[in-house]
Amino acid sequence: MPAQRPLTYQAFVELAVADLAVVGLVLKGSQAHDGMITEHSDHDLYVVLADNATTDLIRFAGHRTLELDLVIVSLAEFRTAGMPGFERYALARARVVLDRLDGDITRILAAKARLDDDEAFRNSGEWLDAYANSLYRSVKNDRDGHALAARLDAADSVGFLLELLFALDRRPRPYNRYLQWELARYPLPGWDTGALLDAVDRVSGTGDVPLQRSLFAQVEAAARRAGHGAVLDAWGEDLDLMRPR
């Protein structure tokens, strides 16, 4: 008996399109990012079923091969996927393959791509405090001769910084793999993309203290404009260690 061929992306899409229980197909990952596809890229596909629908396609739930990964969810589950969560950026930049709901699948994805005002303000305040904490530790460790600790804290601060900058723009932070892709197509307002990426590279790699302080000066100005002065002022005199000399 010949071995069964693995299910291909195109073959599954044909099955799903023919099944009226399927109201949406959403492709995420590198296949949804122009220019990021490699020979190792698989197809990560959300299969959205009408609420309370029954379908034989459920047999493919959890399907995972080198070619095709499937996530099968109800419409209600799809609405809340990544809200909040690690999956949010993937869905924010996902590509609609099928939308049987007159654009509702597309609108759901668009909502995931934008933080609402309250969420953005709350998150950016929390990320600002986390960023300041790691920056402060890095600069203090450098001052006290703890070079490795200073570099590790600097590297930590970069992750918090990126979360903060994207939250200030009401966007989920992209995965590291897509950071340059994202900024090339959707720059952060008020930031020079090349200079920011260079600073992120140097700080995470070397813990460059003067650069960290220079970067903090820009962040402090942006954060105060966004209404986060109280978060910064809570650091009191410790701000002097973070600011440029």
Image (cartoon, grey):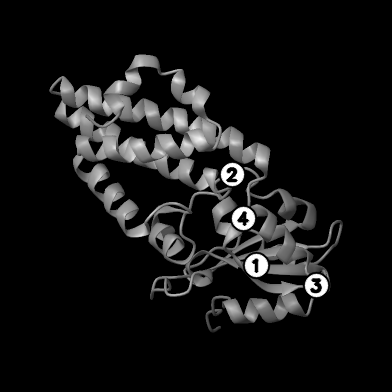
Q: Residues within 10 Å of mark 2 (few under 14, many from 20)?
A: few
- Disc 1 or 4, which lies upstream in sequence? 1
The residue indicated by pointer 2 is 85
Vertical side of 111 occupied by 152: above or below: above
Question: What kind of element bears circle 3?
Answer: loop
Query: Which residue is depicted at the point 26% across and 28% down?
Result: 138
Amino acid type, label 3:
Arg
**CB-based contact (under 8 Å), mark 1 and mark 4:** no
List x then y, in percent, for residue 178: 43, 60
- Three-letter code for the amino acid on which mark 1 is drawn: Val
Q: Few, some or many C-alpha atoms within 10 Å of disc 4 (few <14, some 14-19, many ≥20)?
A: many
Give, as a three-letter code, the residue at label 2. Answer: Gly
Find residue 91 and report its image quarter.
Answer: bottom right
Q: Locate the N terminus and report the quarter of the image it occupies.
A: bottom right
Sequence-wise first label, 2 or 3: 2
The image position of residue 182, as x and y in percent, is: 46, 61
Say what amino acid the circle numbered 4 marks.
Ala
From the image, tell me which residue sits under label 4. 113
The quarter of the image holding the C terminus is: top left
**Who is closer to the viewer here, 102 or 16?**
102
Q: Which residue is drawn at 69% across and 55% down?
A: 111
Of mark 2 and mark 1, the one earlier in the sequence is: 1
The residue that label 3 is drawn on is 100
Picture layout, residue 18 above or below residue 241: below
